[in-house]
């Protein structure tokens, strides 16, 4: 990783790994709590308890990070995640899951802004930044794979009733990452703002609006898979919880492969053409899955293998579009800009979770692929406009 301190790579990747596991364990929580007769409309709001604090808190944490420093802020967020995950197995009430996800969402706001800030402050060239972003974001997909596979094996074992104790593993990794951060030095930005809210001037231009629109629908698509694919497999394809989680893990594995390959080859291709090629491949695959669902429903289980392949082309989109814009942002505004990315992502995830829970509640899962395809078409239109406009200087 091309940063000033070579040993910063591991804790940065572990940070995204940890947040990936705690954010994307919601699919596991939905499956387990649905068996306790908690309805899908109630479970659909769990994402909101994660995403809305994430969005609201992100505006305040920009100057919190500026005042206390990137390293201390990251350590604080990781310690809080570790402590909360340590307590989770011992709490039985449903409201604690809401509180837990709210704390996780707020901590992720800190973590993402810090990680993006570190990368931007040490990278200048657009394609190098894209390579680094895909490399670090790839660990996010490993987190999804790890949490689905690990909890899947635990749930299906003779110790399945103790599935919540898997969160103690996440707690352990959090404390290890805190230790690694304490052992290294990180270059901190010099500006120490005393403002309550960050300076958001200049982010209302058409280029930024299009960028945030693209980001909104990419997150919308990703959450349709990451949070709800296990439940789709279980409810619509009638597979057991273990197989649903393992099949979903393959989506994460393909997504990791997509981001890793992208980080290796992106410098050979124009970012915009690479992005649009991935989008067109997703459209092609979703059309096939929709045809299977509507006209060959007796062969619907082939979707267990179709959806993971989509991850190969979906996963690079978010790092690519972020890196293209971040490379053009002034270093003193990167934290404020990242806070807006966090807000857009949180709102998108929350809206998606509530709307897709309606498909589950009314057993309309035949339209699952078409639901996602609509969002992909929005990405293609907005991304085309964005790339055309961003060829000019912001």
Image (tube, rainbow, N blue to C red):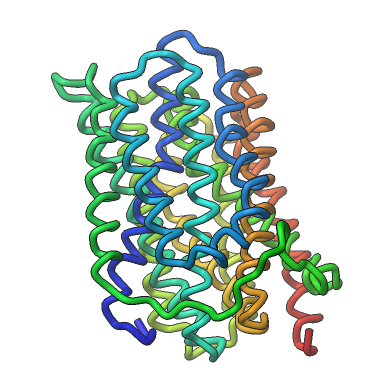
Question: From this viewpoint, is residue 385 visible?
Answer: no
- Give the side of residue 299 with respect to residue 355, left or right: left
Residue 291 location, quadrant: top right
Question: From this viewpoint, is residue 10 visible?
Answer: yes
Give the mark count: 0
Residue at the (43%, 18%) spot, across then down: 33
- Image position, residue 146 (x, y; %): 28, 47
Residue most toward the left?
158
| Looking at the image, residue 213 lies above or below residue 51 | below
Residue 164 location, quadrant: top left
Dividing the image into 4 quarters, which one contains the N terminus?
bottom left
- Image position, residue 210 (x, y; %): 78, 67
Nearest the viewer among 366 and 322 is 322
- Give the side of residue 201 with respect to residue 180, left or right: right
Dividing the image into 4 quarters, which one contains the C terminus?
bottom right
Nearest the viewer among 8 and 125 is 8
| Looking at the image, residue 258 lies above or below residue 101 | below
Residue at the (46%, 31%) spot, across then down: 100
Residue 5 location, quadrant: bottom left
- Give the side of residue 103 with respect to residue 334, left or right: left
Nearest the viewer among 107 and 211 is 107
Residue at the (29%, 82%) spot, across then down: 6
Residue most toward the front?
194
Nearest the viewer among 97 and 372 is 97
- Image position, residue 145 (x, y; %): 32, 48
| Looking at the image, residue 46 lies above or below residue 121 | above
Residue at the (65%, 18%) spot, across then down: 362
- Image position, residue 206 (x, y; %): 86, 71
């Amino acid at each position: 990783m091309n940063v000033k301190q070579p040993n910063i790579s591991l804790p940065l990747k572990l940070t995204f790994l940890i947040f990936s596991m705690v954010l994307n364990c919601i699919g596991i929580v939905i499956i387990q709590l649905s068996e306790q007769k908690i309805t899908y409309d109630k479970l659909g709001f769990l994402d909101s308890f994660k995403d809305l604090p994430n969005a609201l808190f992100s505006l305040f944490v920009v100057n919190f990070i500026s005042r206390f420093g990137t390293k201390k802020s990251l350590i604080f967020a990781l310690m809080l995640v570790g402590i909360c995950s340590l307590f989770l197995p011992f709490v039985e009430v449903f409201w604690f899951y809401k509180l837990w996800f709210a704390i996780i969402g707020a901590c992720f706001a800190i973590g993402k802004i810090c990680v993006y800030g570190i990368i931007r402050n040490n990278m200048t060239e657009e394609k190098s930044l894209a390579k680094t972003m895909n490399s670090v974001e790839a660990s996010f997909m490993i987190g999804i794979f790890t949490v689905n596979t690990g909890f899947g094996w635990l749930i299906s074992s003779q110790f399945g009733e103790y599935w919540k104790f898997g969160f103690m593993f996440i707690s352990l990794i959090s404390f290890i990452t805190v230790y690694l951060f304490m052992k290294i030095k990180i270059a901190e930005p010099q500006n120490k703002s005393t403002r309550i809210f960050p300076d958001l001037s200049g982010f209302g231009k058409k280029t930024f609006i299009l960028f945030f629109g693209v980001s909104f629908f990419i997150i919308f698509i990703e959450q349709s898979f990451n949070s709800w694919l296990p439940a789709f497999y279980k409810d619509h394809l009638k597979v057991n919880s273990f197989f649903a989680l393992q099949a979903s893990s393959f989506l994460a594995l393909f997504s990791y492969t997509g981001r890793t390959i992208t980080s290796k080859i992106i410098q050979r291709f124009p970012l915009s053409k690479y992005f649009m090629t991935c989008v067109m491949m997703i459209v092609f695959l979703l059309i096939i899955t929709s045809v299977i669902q509507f006209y060959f429903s007796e062969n619907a289980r082939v979707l267990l293998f179709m959806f993971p392949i989509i991850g190969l082309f979906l996963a690079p989109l978010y790092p690519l579009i972020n890196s293209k814009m971040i490379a053009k942002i002034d270093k003193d505004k990167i934290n404020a800009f990242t806070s807006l990315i966090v807000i857009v992502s949180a709102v998108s995830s929350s809206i998606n979770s509530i709307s897709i829970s309606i498909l589950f509640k009314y057993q309309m899962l035949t339209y699952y692929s078409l639901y996602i395809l609509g969002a992909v078409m929005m990405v293609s239109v907005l991304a085309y406009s964005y790339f055309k406009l961003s060829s000019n200087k912001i």
